[in-house]
Amino acid sequence: MARLSGAVRSLLASSLGLPGMQDLLSAEMPDDTFEYRYTRYDEAPLPSDKLAFGDPRRYEIGSHQFRIVRNLNETYSLELNYLHEAMSGSSPWYVVPGESGPLQVMSGATIRERRNQVDLSIARAEDEYTHRAKIGYSSENDYRARYGSYSGERESKDGLRTTSWGISYSNDEISPTDALIFGRVVHAQRESLSGSLALTRILNRNAVLQSGVTLSHHSGFLSDPYKQVWINQAVVNDSRPDKRLMFAWTTRFRQYLERSRAALVLDYRFFRDDWSITAHTLELAWRQPLGGHWEVTPSVRYYSQESPEFYAPFFFVHPADGHWSSDYRLSTFGALSFRLNAEFRQEYWSISIGSEYYKSDESLAMTGTPENTPGLVEFWRLTAGLRVKF
Amino acid sequence: MKFVGPSIDLRMWLALLCVGLSACAPVQPWERGRLAQPQMALDSDALLAAMDEHIYSSKEAASGGVGPSGGGCGCN
């Protein structure tokens, strides 16, 4: 949402008696806030007719998120985010040819691990500019990431346009478990650098549009150390290029509907990278306020991607360039998800609950040449959150 | 490998978007009350949006939205 200039803020401050002005001002000056959200994520077990061997039970994840926003004065604010998640289940390992099509081999033993992530940001808002710097750290038993970012935004004098920009950097270390037993890389690094630019525009009194691009470059060990590939009777480690350039263009549109007081939400993302992956994401939502401080939001999301050149479920000939992967997440597939969220808002607190069903399948791909991909995921997500202003 | 540029269809959508961004009616500050309603926010819930990005980017090849990204994870 576009910020309001100092002059406009002053004008609003003297106009608080008018209906709607309280909401407009409070959108500009966020309160000190504490937020907590719990998310339960459950993947459906792999069907027996797609399983070669291994444990068919897939990931279950419980996530706790905490967020605190604290205004230090009229210019500076701090934000602290903490995430803890506990994961268990088995993971797709490699794919073998079967009589009626590819069959998935799953990791045999149940994986149990925990991840902690913390980041701290400081923001400076003055006149038409806002600047934000963030540092963060994520740790799990086999993966560590240290990251930082700077982002800024500038609002036009008339308050109708906001230009946003940002850069971020992440340095990640990978130390796979049981590396010597399974012949995995013992220690590896990867780096990511990204830049983004976006423009937000108030189109009229009922509609706002945001459009932005992100360019990111990844280098280092970009393979998955826990994935292997079947190549002509032999099973070898996943091997991807050590560089990747990604481009994403995202457009978000919000339309207020006077009769129902609802908002129509339309988000679209175009993605392309130099691994020859092209993807489209479309999300449609309807945010409907109800009586008694409730708001319900049904939404549907569609995703489709085309696989890179080095992906196949398995190979009968060794690829000459030395790159191969059978990771189902690189296959040509499409995914549909259906969500329903509900939020109950009071002046100083709110609670929300939500549910999502997500199903990916090669038959849902919009473009490309889909192949039978037994590892594609199906999951449920349940979430509940609390927000308190203090 | 080559980074392939936007297709003709994509360039057409970009042109339409530029027209849409530039051809807007003037909206006075006191006319922006509806735009400040909670249901009109670009991201209505920061924690939910962060979890969305985390889950989808660990199950799909595409990632990235509007704004800088965070750190990676060894998600399987």
Image (cartoon, coloured by chain):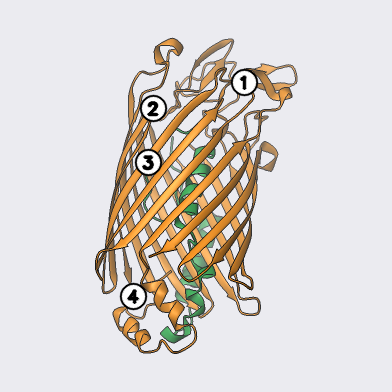
Chain B takes which shade in the image?
green
Name the spot of residue B18 as percent of width and height, x first.
46, 68
For marks 1 and 2, give the CA distance: 22 Å
Mark 4 belongs to which amino acid?
Ser
Q: Left of A259 or right of it: where is A175?
A: left
First in residue order: circle 2 vs circle 4? 2
Q: Tell me the number on the disc at residue A156.
A: 4
Image position, residue A306 (x, y; %): 57, 39
For the residue marked with disc 3, what is the amino acid? Gln
Mark closer to the chain start, 4 or 3: 3
Q: Is residue A263 left or right of residue A7?
A: right
Disc 2 element: loop
Task: Between residue B13 and residue A296, name the one nearer to us.
Answer: A296
Q: Which residue type carries mark 1?
A: Asp
Q: Mark 2 points at which residue?
A: A141
Q: Name the residue under label 1.
A: A55
Q: In this figure, which residue is indicated by the disc labeled 3?
A: A117
The subunit carrying tag 2 is A
A314 and A76: which is toward the camera:
A76
**Residue A94 as seen in the image, left or right of residue A26:** right
Label 2, label 4: how many angstroms apart (C-alpha)?
46 Å
What letter labels the chain drawn in orange? A
Q: Of callouts 1 and 2, which one flags the residue occurring earlier in the amino acid sequence?
A: 1
Q: Do labels 4 and 3 share a chain?
A: yes
Task: Identify which residue is drawn at 41% across, 86% down.
Answer: A16
